[in-house]
Image (tube, rainbow, N blue to C red):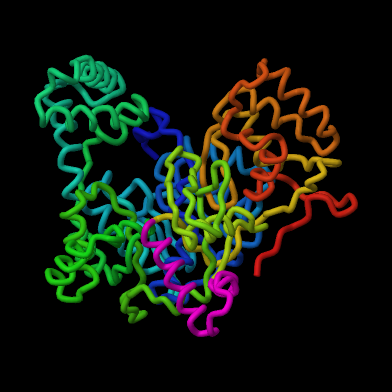
Amino acid sequence: MSETDYDRVDYGGNAQFYTSPNLIAGIGRWLGVPCALPDRARVLELGCGNAANLIPLAWYWPNAEFVGIDLAQTPITQGTVRARGLGLRNLRLEQGDVMALDPDRIGRFDYVIAHGLFSWVPPQVRESVLRLIANVLTPMGVGYVSYNAYPGCRIRHLVREMMQFHLGDQAYNLDSARAAWNMLGSVGAIPEPQRPQFFESFASEVANSMEQGVNYLFHDDLSPNNQPFYLHEFARMARDAGLSYLGDAECSMMFEAIGAPALTAWLDEMSGGDWLRRQQYLDFATGTRFRRSLVCRASDGVVPAPSLERLDGIRLFSEFQPVGVCNPADESQATFRNATGRTINTTTPTLKSVLAMLDLSPTGTIGVAELASRFTGAPPQVALSGARSVLDGLVRSSLAHTVAQDPPGCLVPDRTLSQVAPISALTRESLLTSQTLVDNVNRGFQLSEPWVAQLLLEFDGKVSADHLEARVKELSGASIGAKAPMELGSGLLGLIEMLSHRGMCAPTTDNGHAQPASGA
């Protein structure tokens, strides 16, 4: 086997939230595909790298089966060593070429993931990827394929072309990537008042390219293969391979913003009721630059369409939590924030109530039935219809996400703090090796302060809350009134609840502390 660029230059890897089979299953069921539940599913990832995406999935879903394939041996070896260290027996990693994989040997899969692969390989490999997905998917199985998308990726390619022009005939290697990196850095040195109008958006794209580091620039922006596609082009290639386009793993990509009736009317007129054409026109309107397309076998005969009634059979969770006081009973303003710092302000009682319900739910999820029960005084069918409409709006606006099952590993901590549950082996291993922390919905995140990691390593199920409180003050050097990190914004109990709800603590058997949570 010849050495690849990914053997020579480390690409790293992270968990990819939108590849979670639980999330894909929720979207698929909403669109009309009765796909397999994730807790017993078979999942294949093509181009899995060091398995940073598959390892957390295999950890949280021990009764599911995961297989990862990558052309480069070095990351496969790295992932295999890490998986063995965690004792994962439901994950198999193989070095292999997608063009040579035998579907009969690897078997059938309920979900196939191809993230960060399709745009960065030659045309013949792209064709093989789609054919392989069509050949290995089970009936009503779902494939996930991400790619750079037009029209938004055109400006990203201008940055790529400027780097190529700057490098001239230099060989494609890490040294030339460093030279391109230095050149991009000079763009940011031009003061904003002196930038032409077009150059301002160009400089913003340059900043995006530099955020990930030189190795990322080498593998992504400077790769000999970096081909964006319009959605309709991808759908045609999928159709030629025997697949049907379903929708996008990021639900908000499929819909315009709520409260834009003129845009809605224009999209309806242009598309003539065609699901795919409507999304393509929306991409033109919003400048979409990246797609996470979902596909199924064409022979399954699925005609995709989101359905209010199908929401009854799935769960929803939100990344937004209340900041300060939230009174759902009146029209006072409430603020909600997610882990990335995005905030929303609302005075709408129903929206405040739903987001507050999600925050208080032991599993972090709600369903139509729970929400309908809050419509006091309304006839059952009216309450049901109202709950569906509210949740549908949350999904379309990306304030909530669909899942087929409650996230695994959710615990209800002891609020008296008489006992603090230990962090899980995955969380501990990630902290000790400086890996990105990953929760039970496949969200990767970094702690806002290094000392918080040291604090978490002391969560061994033996130390008292008093000891941990003292350690917070000792490690942080916090003075009275100092602002705490986001993870400690609600005190030690808030941190413990976050870890417990996100599946990052291990259950204990001591007098009912840290018990598994249950949804409806």
- The tally of labels here is 0
Residue at the (41%, 40%) spot, across then down: 72
Residue 25 image position (x, y, % from top left): 48, 66
Residue 326 seen in render? yes
Image quarter where the C terminus lies is bottom right
Image quarter where the N terminus lies is top left
Q: Nearer the viewer, residue 159 or 269?
A: 269
Residue 497 image position (x, y, % from top left): 68, 45
Residue 245 image position (x, y, % from top left): 29, 68
Left or right: where does residue 91 sit relative to residue 514?
A: left
Residue at the (78%, 43%) spot, across then down: 421
Left or right: where does residue 510 sit relative to residue 388?
A: right
Q: Nearer the viewer, residue 440 or 126?
A: 440
Residue at the (28%, 61%) spot, across then down: 259
Decide whether residue 396 is among the magenta residues: yes
Q: Nearer the viewer, residue 390 or 170?
A: 390
Q: Is residue 178 above or below residue 455?
A: above
Q: Is residue 102 above or below residue 15?
A: below
Residue 51 seen in render? no
Residue 303 image position (x, y, % from top left): 31, 79
What kind of secondary structure does the magenta stretch mostly adopt? helix
Q: Is residue 468 above or below residue 90?
A: above
Name the outermost residue toward the right.
511
Q: Nearer the viewer, residue 106 or 358?
A: 358
Q: Which residues are magenta?
A: 368-397
Decide whether residue 191 is among the magenta residues: no
Left or right: where does residue 201 sit relative to residue 58?
A: left
Q: Is residue 208 above or below residue 315?
A: above
Left or right: where does residue 67 sit relative to residue 422?
A: left
